[in-house]
Image: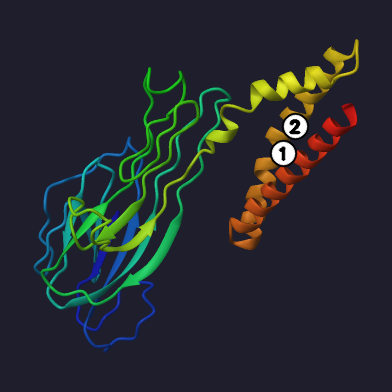
């Protein structure tokens, strides 16, 4: 995660969109979830105003930027005196790889917003989501099934979920079920385990059983070809749909519709064979 703070009263940092002379001090924050291979500095850095951050800080004009990479632990940031609100962009960690088909997990979400009502000396707790890890026997070979730091779900056959990135006002030792103090949250990426296990074996068995006598090889080969074509073409189509609409909802709705159609066709075929 990267925190950028305006170093001058009434003078906004780049891209804040606020005019000079506005009341109070406004910080600019970019919270980015780094991968597990990124290094992170942990030495506190003193800014031009009283503040400390467990991150790598750089200064550019009136803006001080402190970058928080993934460490596998909670990090902290202290609001400088006079700063009352901060702009934030948070990105969750990506989902883990699935080993059977060597399929990568989904990207983490990106969320932007402004944190208001802050006060000098206040401590914000920074959670940078981690990507899932692998390891036998918890995961099948090649899969990163153990969920990432900060809430990533764990699978076994498929890839695990990436951890969320968030900023909160209370440490993670305070259960979210007691007090949810998160100010902004970017969910981690996932890999749908349904497609990683459980469907392939029954699907092959169904194709071979449903094939006409003496045409099993042709039917299975045709089904495999269609399956591979779909694997290559569908992800880019869904990605383009997300880019065009700016939302995952249409893509998920299309997948749901195709699933319903497939179930209906299968059910009709079953009724005909009885």
Q: Is residue 232 above or below residue 123?
A: above
Residue 60 point in image, percent of width and height: 26, 64
- Give the residue number, with chain letter if any, for mark 2: 229
Residue 170 point in image, percent of width and height: 18, 60
Secondary structure at badge 1 equals helix
Left or right relative to 228: residue 242: left
Residue 256 at least partly seen: yes
Q: Is residue 203 above or below residue 170?
A: above
Residue 220 at least partly seen: no
Foreground residue among 227 and 262: 262
Q: Residue furthest front?
A: 274
Give residue 268's mark: none
Protein image colouring: rainbow
Q: Quadrant of the C terminus?
A: top right
Left or right relative to 253: residue 107: left
**Total numbered badges shown on the rendered structure:** 2
Residue 62 point in image, percent of width and height: 23, 71
Q: Pointer 2: residues within 10 angstroms few (<14), some, or many (20+)?
A: few
**Residue drawn at point x = 83 percent, y = 22 percent:** 210
- Give the residue number, with chain letter if any, for mark 1: 233
Left or right relative to 214: residue 78: left
Label pair 2/1, CB-CB below 8 angstroms: yes
Q: Is residue 196 above or below residue 45?
A: above
Q: CA distance from mark 2 to mark 1?
A: 6 Å
Determine which quarter of the picture holds residue 76. Answer: bottom left
**Residue drawn at point x = 19 percent, y = 81 percent:** 9
**Residue drawn at point x = 86 percent, y = 19 percent:** 211
Residue 73 point in image, percent of width and height: 21, 43
**Residue drawn at point x = 42 percent, y = 61 percent:** 111
């Amino acid at each position: 995660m990267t925190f950028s703070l305006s170093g001058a009263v009434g003078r906004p940092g780049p891209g804040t969109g606020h005019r000079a002379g506005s009341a109070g001090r406004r910080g600019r924050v970019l919270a980015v979830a780094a991968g597990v291979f990124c290094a992170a500095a942990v030495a506190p850095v003193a800014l031009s105003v009283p503040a400390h951050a467990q991150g790598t800080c750089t200064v550019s004009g009136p803006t001080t930027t402190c970058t928080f990479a993934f460490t596998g632990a909670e990090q902290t940031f202290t609001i400088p005196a006079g700063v009352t609100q901060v702009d934030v962009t948070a990105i969750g960690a990506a989902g883990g790889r699935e080993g059977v088909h060597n399929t990568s997990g989904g990207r983490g979400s990106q969320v932007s917003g402004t944190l208001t009502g802050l006060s000098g000396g206040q401590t914000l707790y920074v959670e940078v989501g981690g990507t899932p890890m692998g390891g036998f026997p918890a995961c099948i070979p090649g899969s990163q099934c153990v969920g990432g730091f900060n809430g990533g779900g764990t699978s076994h056959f498929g890839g695990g979920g990436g951890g969320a990135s968030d900023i909160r006002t209370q440490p993670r030792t305070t259960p979210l079920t007691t007090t949810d103090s998160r100010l902004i949250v970017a969910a981690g990426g996932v890999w749908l385990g349904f497609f990683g296990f459980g469907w392939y074996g029954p699907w092959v068995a169904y194709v071979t059983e449903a094939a006409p006598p003496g045409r099993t090889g042709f039917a299975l080969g045709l089904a495999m070809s269609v399956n591979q074509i779909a694997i290559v073409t569908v992800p880019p189509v869904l990605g383009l749909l997300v880019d065009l609409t700016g939302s995952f909802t249409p893509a998920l709705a299309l997948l749901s519709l195709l699933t319903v159609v497939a179930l209906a066709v299968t059910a009709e075929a079953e009724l005909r064979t009885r």
